[in-house]
Every structure is written in C-alpha cells, then in structure tokens.
Image (cartoon, helix red, strand yellow):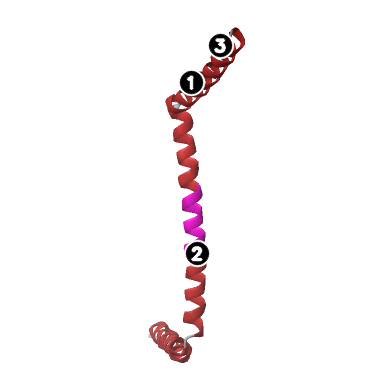
Amino acid sequence: MTAPEIQQEIDRTRERLGETVDELAAKADVKARTQAKAAEMKAKAQGKAAEMKAKATEVSGQVRRSPVVQRRWPVAAAAAASIVLVGSLLAWRRRKT
C-alpha cells in the first residue's frame, strides 16, 4: 500500500468511527428518545381520537335517521308533556289548599 492509499483508509475509518459515535450518542440520549417516543404516542392518540370522533358522528347520524328513533320521538314528547301537565296540576292543587 502506498502512503495515499493508507491515508484514504485512515480517512474512511475515521468517518465510520464518527458515524458510530454519533449513533451511540443518540442511543445514550434518553431524554431525546423519550421525548420522541412521547411525541409519537401523542400523534397516534390524536389520530385515534379523530377516528373515533368521526365514527361516533357517523353512528349518531345513523341513529337520528333510524325509523325507530323517529317513531319514538312523538311518544317521548307526549310523555314529557304529560309529566309537565301532571306536575303543574299537582303544584296548582297544593297551592290552592
């Protein structure tokens, strides 16, 4: 090997060693790794929450359009009106006595 070849081999070895040291330093930086993992988990949770919200909106729309719900709405309104009427009559009767 000639002197220039040896120098090139030394330079390549230094470069690989520098890359290895950088990789080891990144692995040793627990705080940065923890923050990166936390950011990843947060993004994943936000994505899942958005997915669940969209699904809930879809299901809610289906329920509202459901014939069963639409038929029960007048019954529920009549029941609520009856309760208010009976309550009012009882309150009026107690005030009168």
Q: Quadrant of residue 31?
A: top left
Name the amino acid type tagged 1. Answer: Val
Q: Are marks 3 and 1 in contact (CB under 8 Å)?
A: no
Q: In whole angstroms, how far apart are the C-alphas of marks 1 and 2?
A: 45 Å
Please give the name of the residue rendered at 48% of the width and 44% of the height, measured from the top-left corner: 40
- The quarter of the image holding the C terminus is bottom left
Give the magenta part as a residue range.
43-53
> Disc 1 marks which residue?
21
Q: Is residue 67 magenta?
A: no
Q: Closest to the observer: 72 or 37? A: 37
Locate residue 83, reporting x and y percent: 41, 86
Locate residue 8, reporting x and y percent: 59, 15
Please give the name of the residue rendered at 58% of the width and 13% of the height, measured from the top-left corner: 5
Question: Please, is residue 15 above or below residue 61 in the view?
Answer: above
> Disc 2 marks which residue?
53
Locate residue 18, reporting x and y percent: 53, 19
**Mark earlier in primary sequence (3, 1):** 3
Question: Please, is residue 41 above or below residue 24 in the view?
Answer: below
Q: Quadrant of residue 75?
A: bottom left
Please give the name of the residue rendered at 45% of the width and 91% of the height, measured from the top-left corner: 78
> Disc 3 marks which residue?
6
Query: Residue 34 has which mark?
Result: none
